Amino acid sequence: MKLLKPTWVNHNGKPIFSVDIHPDGTKFATGGQGQDSGKVVIWNMSPVLQEDDEKDENIPKMLCQMDNHLACVNCVRWSNSGMYLASGGDDKLIMVWKRATYIGPSTVFGSSGKLANVEQWRCVSILRSHSGDVMDVAWSPHDAWLASCSVDNTVVIWNAVKFPEILATLRGHSGLVKGLTWDPVGKYIASQADDRSLKVWRTLDWQLETSITKPFDECGGTTHVLRLSWSPDGHYLVSAHAMNNSGPTAQIIEREGWKTNMDFVGHRKAVTVVKFNPKIFKKKQKNGSSAKPSCPYCCCAVGSKDRSLSVWLTCLKRPLVVIHELFDKSIMDISWTLNGLGILVCSMDGSVAFLDFSQDELGDPLSDEEKSRIHQSTYGKSLAIMTEAQLSTAVIENPEMLKYQRRQQQQQMDQKSVSSRETGSATSMAGVVNGESLEDIRKNLLKKQVETRTADGRRRITPLCIAQLDTGDFSTAFFNSIPLSGSLAGTMLSSHSSSQLLPVDSNTPNSFGPSKPSTEPVATASTRPVGDSVSKDSVNATSTPAASSPAVLTTPSKIEPMKAFDSRFTERSKATPGAPALTSATAASVERLKEQNLVKELRPRDLLDSSSDSDEKIHVTKSSSLSKRKLELEVETVEKKKKGRPRKDSRLMSVSLSVQSPAALTTEKDAVCLSVPAPTLKLPIPGPQRAFTLQVSSDPSMYIEVENEVMTVGGVKLSRLKCNREGKEWETVLTSRILTAAGSCDVICVACEKRMLSVFSACGRRLLPPILLPSPISTLHCTGSYVMALTAAATLSVWDVHRQMVVVKEESLHSILAGSDMTVSQILLTQHGIPVMNLSDGKAYCFSPSLSTWNLVSDKQDSLAQCADFRSSLPPQDAMLCSGPLAIVQGRASTSGRQAARLFSVPHVVQQETTLAFLENQVAAALTLQSSHEYRHWLLLYARYLVNEGFEYRLREICNDLLGPVHYSTGSQWESTVVGLRKRELLKELLPVIGQNLRFQRLFTECQEQLDILRDK
Amino acid sequence: MAKVSVLNVAVLENPSPFHSPFRFEISFECSEALADDLQWKIIYVGSAESEEFDQVLDSVLVGPVPAGRHMFVFQADAPNPALIPESDAVGVTVVLLTCTYLGQEFLRVGYYVNNEYPDPELRENPPPKPDFSQLQRNILASSPRVTRFHISWDGPPEPQGSPEPALGCAAAAKGLGLPGYVPGLLAENSMDCL
């Protein structure tokens, strides 16, 4: 074993509370106290591992520091994928960080050093829920959840796929919760608190599995953290501070029956942190020794308030090594490298130590397959994907396939090298905007920048955007092809020069060998002086802080005023006379007050609308009712937003029945919801109103104003319809009162009294003579050139105004509403003129014009959706947010939490079947809704799942359908497109997915060849 | 967490004659699009003794601000010499660059400024009444003092009391002008460069 204290890893003497090594082994994060704030620092690992790198000034040591936390950071943890870093602190916040790739280095402006941030880590989510300091955070295996615990006595489970969604808040502790650990197979999470208990919670229903108190009866709440740990094989849970016969211990809790028969004894003060090595080991087979297979064992590091560290193997009764006096203060956190041979330890004294073991000392680590085999044999199949290693035995039969596999590998390599190169080249990348160098921009900035005057005569500068923030730069590599580059760290470890790492003088070198477990290997105090000498040496290497006080300002007489100035730097200005800020701020706050009043006025109406549950709906109400009064405001904000980010497609605007018309619904007819008595369906009808306004879309800004009976011409009262589209207005008059209106970018339609429906073009031309509806209108809706009318007699019609055709003809809602007191909670008309009804029982039906049937497209209570688990087939996270009518109907509620919760409780076969059924439902629903984008999304996902799970027949059927007949024959019924997508193009997209599983190489070849033939024709 | 962080402030044309305008090239980063404009202000501290002599050289609105990195040049006229006490004209003073959002100051960058006569003769024997046309202004650009304040980015806290329509403006102005009275608006962190 070698020991090193890299002195350059520090927070300027402030305590370091947490340390965590990145899964790829190339960097690590520390968290702790900064200057007046919390601080997270990301460090380069290679200078720790290799002396040459430490001396090389071109190799950065610090990669990034973030002082965004307002108070001390207690915990930093990398996600298992390495994509994210979570940090939690005394400011009650958890921040989730992600690396931004195409923004160059930057410094913290005004901070002392010239230290540039080599990597840019940007906070992508702030998680607020805790009412007290956050003490520990932990990512679940597979990164589906993030757990955090706090001094507010709770543990919060966050949906890591969809921050900041909270899946559960675990209450039950009656003291400060100071440590968390997940079961390696994801079935449990354990927490330890100051209330002298350790609690294990089930991830299935987030309920308490067991509460263990006995070993903690004598404990006092004096440790800052209680970081417990679960062994990688899942068998043991080891607590932090426990007591046995008034001596501090780390309690071992067996998974089987939560028995507490064993503990790690020997530390003189409370144990603050326990951390299992991620690897499972087996004994190194020595030449000549008996080939008796030994039991695999785990390795565990224990840190304590007594400032010493002990490392244990579960096969030994005594610690493998104990290191005393490693720090001046309590040990706070421990992190193992992924290869299991190195540990970083941090302390309250603000320093870290690195320990490096050899395989001779720890044993041979089991490979990932062996480890997952252990998991499988103990807990059932945990991951269904065929691993690459298993595939390596298959023979590649086809050169095309070989080429394809090679290309994939090449891509991965490229991505890796790109990301590694980015560090170096980011500077130059950031230096160029639109082909213009930053220097050029700066030269002309003053001339070029746009300056305007606001209405009140103040200067307003439009800043020049020099870089976009990246929103999603996930690599497009498929989910299951992400390599774990633990081996990289391994080679680095093994190849470093031993001169830097100083061998610890342990009394009995033999004691590391597993053959003599009886000797007690206690390292002497000699480690500390050694550490000190290292620190002295490296002081020279670190740049001495520039001790220059402002030389220009050395006029002695001015020293006193300087002090007076000092306060000015940090105190906020009092009201500076004549500062325009005040007036503007006042105006703003008055404006806000007004708005609040408006909102208040609106509330009662909102309450009436309680039947519907979508947020979107409320937004619609507000904006439409407000729009009249704050038109200008609206337009302005829209403009602003336009420049910011692309707006989502607003053509698909879901409108709820109860809200659809801003005209107050005739509530006296008991119709907040559409309660439908069984025999005759009667939907509420909007009553006449003097005037109302309706916002059709916000981008382009378009709204309709209706004024009923505004003028009288020759005894006839006329009503006026006005439409304003981005400032351009048209108006027309109608002879009867307008009850409700709707519009899209293409058509505007209004329903009047006497069952009349009139349709106008976007520019105000009447397109049809008034349509006479069979019964009074209930709801009117437009999308594109489609107009949908729902009448009070619960019949639904959809017309295509441009083609002057009926799409749905007076279809009764009877079949979907009959027989119960269900109500329609939301109506949607897709771009293809397909009506979708969301019902209050969570089901959604769409009407298929070609089949003349109502089809169930979504069901909130669908158990399939809850059991289905296809995360392994998902492309990187961002892509799964696929928008379209299906997504709107089903809601974005991610089911991943539930899915994952079921992952280990359902037999794998059942899991497969439900997942298949669910995915097939989705594909079919998207098809019926004619949502091409979503169809493609779900089809690809389905295919990927089939590939991963090895379902050949279904896959082949899909491929055959997509391919169609290669030789054209007149009798063929085959359509070359599906919902506007070319089938063969889809197949081309599918091929790389199929090519991932060598088992399907024949299918891959067949399709490839036939596509080639078709192309050549 | 602050939605806006300043990446750099470059002091342009420094040193320069006293009467030439101040020019700061400011680069900042915004983590999510801002609904309102940022307001930047340059305050020239006339005298260390009293804030009475502070001059707001200029204030500009900057917007719209979408997420991303941005830069602009903030130019402001030189301070009015008539408002500077004669005894403080020559020597060291301070210029402050502040940024507020929704009426709340969240950033303050302070620079020492040295006003002196470049002419050695004048330096030896300064005229009894300062000759501003001869003075040179030197901003110690390498050592900004940056102070960040924690503010509410979704809007300032409700002003206390019930603002009557007539007096509402005054009350609100006070509340915003003296943030010390509003709880929770303490310095988020302050950083010295020295």
Image (cartoon, coloured by chain):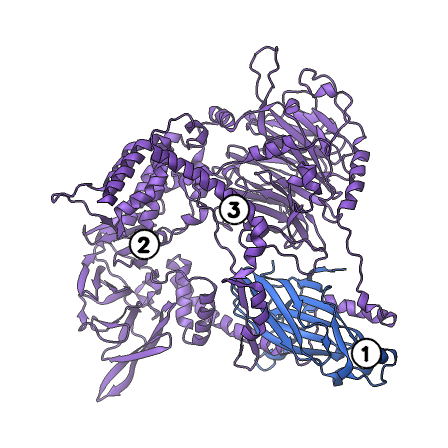
Chain colours: A purple, B blue
- Quadrant that contains the C terminus of chain A: top left
Which of the numbered marks, if any, corresponds to residue A538? none
Question: Which residue in the protein does label 2 denote?
Answer: A838
Kind of residue at badge 3:
Val
Question: Which residue in the protein does label 3 denote?
Answer: A418
- Distance of label 2 from label 3 (alpha carbons): 47 Å
Observer-side mark, 2 or 1, equals 1
At 27% from the left and 35% from the top, the residue drawn is A1006
Q: Chain of mark 1?
A: B
Marks 3 and 1 share the same chain: no
Q: Which element type, helix, strand or loop, lies under badge 2?
A: strand
Kind of residue at badge 2:
Asn
In primary-sequence order, the first of circles 2 and 3 is: 3
At 17% from the left and 63% from the top, the residue drawn is A805
- In the figure, A118 relative to A372: above or below? below
The quarter of the picture where residue A865 lies is top left
| Relative depth, front residue between B69 and B4 | B69
Kind of residue at badge 1:
Asp
- Quadrant that contains the N terminus of chain A: top right
Q: Position of residue B7 (x, y in %)?
A: 62, 61
Observer-side mark, 2 or 3, equals 3
Question: Which residue in the protein does label 1 denote?
Answer: B119
Residue B8 is left or right of residue A909, and the answer is right
Q: Which element type, helix, strand or loop, lies under badge 1?
A: loop
Circles 2 and 3: CB distance less than 8 Å? Answer: no
Please tell me how many numbered marks the rendered image carries: 3
At 63% from the left and 30% from the top, the residue drawn is A494
